[in-house]
Amino acid sequence: MKIHEYQAKEFFKKYGIPVPKEKVCFSLDEIISTAKEIGLPCVIKAQVMVGGRGKAGGIKVAKTEEEVKTYGSQILGMDIKGLKVKKVLVSEAVDIASEAYLGIIIDRNEKKIVLMACKEGGVEIEEVARQKPEAIYKVYADPLLGLLEHKAREIGLFLYGNTKNAFDCAAIALQLYRLFIENDASLAEINPLVVNSSGNLIALDAKINFDDNALYRHPEIEAMRDRESEDENELLAREKDLSYVKLNGNIGCVVNGAGLAMATMDLVKHYGGEPANFLDIGGSSSPEKVKNALEILLRDRNVKVIFFNIFGGITRCDDVALGILEAKKVLDIKQPIVARLTGTNEDKAREILKEAGLIFAKTMDEGASKAIELLKQL
Amino acid sequence: MSILVNKDTRLVVQGITGRDGSFHTRQMLNYGTKVVAGVTPGKGGTEVEGVPVFNSVAEAVRKTGANTSVIFVPAKFAPNAIYEAIDAGIELIVCISEGIPTIEMVKVIAYLKDKKCRLIGPNSPGLVSPGETKVGILPGHIFKKGNIGVISRSGTLTYEIVDHITRTGLGQSTCIGIGGDPIIGTKFIDCLELFAQDPETEAVVIVGEIGGRDEQDAAEYIKKNFKKPVFGFIAGKTAPPDKRMGHAGAIISGTAGTAAEKIKAFESAGIKVGETPAQVAELIKSTLK
């Protein structure tokens, strides 16, 4: 789960990580009054959960009251990569003496939590990792003891030549690590971490992602979810315990299992079609789940053909068939359905769906081809 | 021969009294797996499908000689179930549970260090050595005894590919679902090392997906050390960045972990990559003939 910069900064404050004087605003009036409070010049930052806000014109420095109004009204409501800006962060402008990167992630290969530092700030760390990995300094936290103090100092001394900044940085690193562990983060990033003109460290930007698997034990974090920034169908799917990701094509896919669901999208593309979505109905799927899946799929107006690809193991094909029948009764499904149901109880499934007007396929290759053919006929 | 599990596998099912645990106990018994014990704290002394249930893994090991455990308990309780199995001296733990917080897995991996115990999973469908034993939830009927080793991060996609392999007339030595989580006990390379030493495994299939760089590491290892033919498939060519595709581990972070970079790594290591699941089986057939 992702949160906004202003929410991440609230975590920073709670953990004593220094941030600029700033406030989140929801209207132009609020922006103007906040700018007065904070003083000019100030920075107006769009709060949307996509990278590249700056390049898209979503971050501006206002030097006068006039500019606060102009930029405030420009940024509030603007569209950044398909997301409408509904809130902005008004922040004191910091005189930057130097910028660095400090972040924590879980290193999948080492199977440990890793703290990473880079002397360049504002970079995309994955890109640096690829282009010049030697620019990234890493220290690992001990899985059982946590981030040891001397390791935190090691990072501080790597980034800064003077001990004041180095040890302040070590303290920030330790707090960032605590934040990471206590809240089950999957990423906690200060990018950039700056030294201001008075020589103090400040976290200018903040990014925290949380481990979806751990949200059950953090209801307060789940409550921070910005439902407006997420796809409505994806939210609905999560509530119904389905895994759904919207894509831009027109062949709706319903599959059991995440790997097979990805392979099905790829296969549709392979045969020249465009998948409308990723949708995994899970292992032991009941007719109810299948009905819910179809309901979510049909909310996407782009879906012109539906492709069921079920490899029955624990999932029983007759359950899926019953779900399709049930859905056909209550939903107005105009789109043709191509069904590839193989494995456990596939004969029963065919019997159940005999009169349902589906197009059957024996293999997933045949199913994908048929779905694309049907699309051409529409 | 086979790797990791065989006819000498004596299995204890942790969480045997639950819905999934009891259902799959029946399925495994039907396949011929020696399910010797079940564990559910508080249900000791009862039976499930004729299998005795104990209050602890240690007791189950002492009384039945169990050497392998399969875990069906909810994610919340799964790390403790793993710790218990490690302490009871279980040699191989297969964790089916999905949804364990990643930070908990970091601790589990640290606890496993220097212990004579291997963990498969979590979020694994289990493993099968056809004709010998099945541990987990894979559908037994699609497998056939043979010489192809299969390693996969996924469940149903593995079944799809195995089904194609079986239909071409070839069989499998062992098929391992290593799990779809970002942190797992046994990775592609670990399985490759075991398959390298197994005389009956003639070729290996790696079924990978987006996220992480386990496939790239496997490719490097194969280039340097692995002599048997390897075939591959990568799922998620059409997956968008920064979106979790079902599995917790299946996510492209920014520009890292894409299907394209994994396929490239495979190809540069001489691994033949199928564009579709069906093509994987065709490639194997035409190469091994």
Image: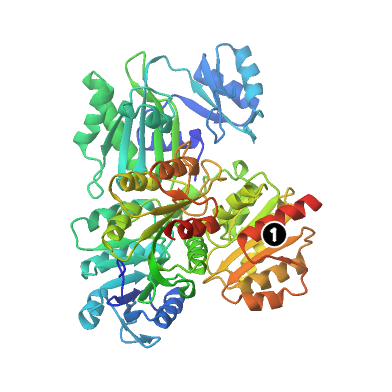
Q: According to the image, label 1 marks what residue? A: A295
Q: How many marks?
A: 1
Q: Chain of mark 1?
A: A
The C terminus of chain B sits in image quarter:
bottom left
Instruction: Give whichever of A2, B275 is nearer the camera.
Output: B275
Q: Position of residue A271 (x, y in %)?
A: 65, 50
Residue occupying image coordinates x 43% and y 17%: A94
Q: Position of residue B81 (x, y in %)?
A: 31, 67
Instruction: Give whichever of A31, A117 is nearer the camera.
Output: A117
**Residue B257 seen by the camera:** no
Q: Position of residue A159 (x, y in %)?
A: 28, 24
Seen in the image, is A77 located left or right of residue B171?
A: right
Instruction: Give whichever of A20, A146 is nearer the camera.
Output: A146
The N terminus of chain B sits in image quarter:
bottom left
Q: For the residue labelled by badge 1, is the local secondary structure a helix, a strand or a loop?
A: helix
Residue occupying image coordinates x 30% and y 77%: B7
Q: Position of residue A168 (x, y in %)?
A: 27, 26
Question: Tag 1: Cα neighbours inside 10 Å, few (<14), some, or many (≥20)?
Answer: some
Seen in the image, is A298 located left or right of residue A246?
A: right
